[in-house]
Image (spheres, rainbow, N blue to C red):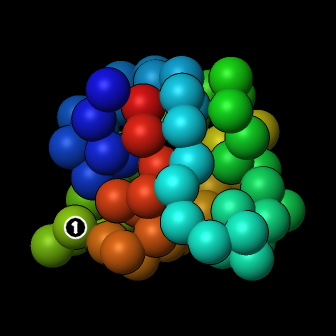
Amino acid sequence: MMPLTMAKPGEENTIRKIGGKEEIRRFLENLGFVVGGKVTVVSDMNGNVIVNVKNTRVAIGKDMANRIMV
């Protein structure tokens, strides 16, 4: 397992765990980040990432991306 910030762009990964407080997990779940779901990093700029999740592009900050384990 590794944080989403370490995933290579263009590589599809499976979300294995989402860390953090309940409200943070719920926020990420509302964006489409659910355990078992597929996520692909589109681009990575200084740890901030743009990802494809559930056929939608989402930009998340480095701190949020570090809570998503793939």
Residue 51 percent coordinates (x, y): 50, 51
Q: Amino acid at mark 1?
A: Gly
**Label 1 secondary element:** loop
Q: Is residue 50 left or right of residue 36?
A: left
Residue 55 visible, this angle = no
Q: Quadrant of residue 10?
A: top left
The answer to whether 34 appears left or right of 42 in the picture is: right
* Residue 21, x across and y down, in percent: 62, 72
Residue 43, x across and y down, in percent = 32, 54
Q: Residue at x 31, y 45 (%)?
A: 3
Of all residues, the one furthest to the right in this rendering is 30
Along the line of sight, which residue is nearer the eye, 50 or 64? 64
Residue 67, placed above or below residue 2: below
- Quadrant of res 67: bottom left
| Residue 9 picture quarter | top left
Could you tell me residue 16's position as x and y percent?
A: 54, 28
Image quarter hosting the C terminus: top left
Residue holding disc 1: 47
Q: Residue at x 73, y 40 (%)?
A: 34
Residue 60 visible in the current orientation: yes
In the picture, the quarter occupied by the N terminus is top left
Residue reaching furthest front?
21
Residue sitting at 27 percent across and 35 percent down? 2
